[in-house]
Amino acid sequence: MVDQSTPEARTPGTAPGEAEAASAREGISRRRMLGTAGATGLVLGTAGAAGGYAAAPSEAAAPLTSLGTDRAMFHGKHQPGITDALQARGHVVAFDLTAGAGRKEAAALLRRWSETARRLMAGEPNGHDDTGVARDAGPSSLTITFGFGHSFFARTGLEKRRPASLDPLPEFSSDHLDKNRSNGDLWVQIGANDSLVAFHALRALQKDTGSAARVRWQMNGFNRSPGATAHPMTARNLMGQIDGTRNPKPAEADFDQRIFVPEKGEPSWMANGSYAVVRRIRMLLDDWEKLSGTAQEDVIGRRKSDGAALSGGTETTAMDLEKTDAKGNLVVPINAHARITRPDQNGGAAMLRRPFSFHDGIDTDGVPDAGLLFICWQADPLRGFVPVQRKLDRGDALSQYIRHESSGLFAVPGGAAKGEYVGQKLLEG
């Protein structure tokens, strides 16, 4: 869970689409287009005002902060929300098609969803029925990502086009899965650096479903806000550990091979796509926090202060698995989480982790319902997530402090070209 890093992502608004992003920073955000509440006298518009918004014409629009102007691109080779930097707020939600809804209804829904995603990621209001929840904000690094679950293909008569890589995950001994909060026909991931922008997107997509689909489950998460630390750094999780040091990096030569389905891969509609494993992992924080700092570090295999391996160096220094102390004991314990999850200990298995933390209140017994919304990306889960989780199942020191409570696997097709919608090659091919 810990020893693979948050993405070393491109800065939001840079390639691909640098020119478009630069334009966005200069003038496409809501506030630059429409003015700001208070500063510009923003009010509900009368009939004819775009999206029901209007700004006082006599006052200059105030610029957004850099956090608000940051924009991710909807159209592209890959869907957004995979290699983009972690955002401060996230929602993951699964939908099931309703009785009687099939391929035609699913295609119409993905067409609506894609257009809504394009508008909102550009910082535009969502047409005439926009709720105005995010009226004062810019794009705020909003990303919206769509995927298909195993059951989707039977419901739409597309079983022959279901990828072999979407076969159900095997059972693991650490699983305590709630079936009502697992799987689903359709999956949506939303991330943004502003909570209202993220909620606005969630509400818009939910309204778009109409009678075609219903929510199966929804989970909400968060990360540290950009700029909250003195310098960019790997995120921490709710155990206080730096979480994600060994993630594959986009600059690495084999990154695309590990994370994305190749251009000529199978099935063809998944070209440039990826597979997302989604797990709700509850952290047993009361038990964890009873451990001493040294004991916590032994469980993980890394220093809590800076994420460096217990064998020495900095966060990025290679772990020395053979190093021993004066008594001849391994410095990195044999069952340490960071040791077990290393790709070189799992046949080269690698996945791009892009999680959110969650806290859903306090149970009746006073225990926090908190942990990690684990989301990982790979070209093939049988070569990414599965071998690592099997290894963890056999003796990870962290396993007694966490509980896997829900699970899902989704096929996430490549990005949509301009004029197309996500999944068009599947639904119209």
Image (cartoon, rainbow, N blue to C red):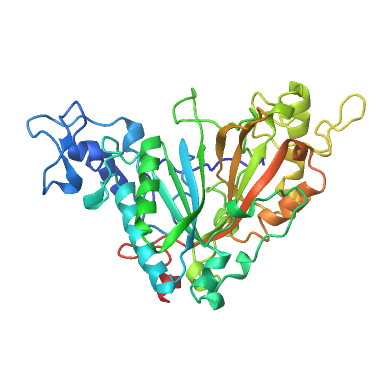
User: Is 99 on the left or on the right of 151, as rendered?
Assistant: left
Asked if one can make out residue 194 in the rendered structure from this viewpoint, the answer is: no
Question: In this view of the protein, which residue sits in the foreground, 203 or 59?
Answer: 203
Query: Compared with residue 40, is residue 383 higher up or lower down, i.e. above or below?
Result: below
Query: Compared with residue 279, is residue 328 higher up or lower down, i.e. above or below?
Result: above
* Extreme-right residue of the structure: 327
Query: Which residue is at 55% across, 78% downward?
Result: 160
Query: Which residue is at 74% across, 22% downward?
Result: 293
Q: Position of residue 308 (x, y in %)?
A: 68, 30
Asked if one can make out residue 207 in the rendered structure from this viewpoint, the answer is: yes
Q: Position of residue 232 (x, y in %)?
A: 50, 30
User: Is 360 on the left or on the right of 345, as rendered?
Assistant: left
User: Is 63 on the left or on the right of 185, as rendered?
Assistant: left
Quick one: quadrant of the N terminus? Answer: top right
Question: In this view of the protein, which residue sits in the foreground, 321 or 365?
Answer: 365
Query: Which residue is at 18% across, 26% downward?
Result: 39
Query: Which residue is at 38% across, 58% downward?
Result: 209
Name the image quarter holding residue 3.
top right
Query: Compared with residue 56, is residue 110 higher up or lower down, i.e. above or below?
Result: below
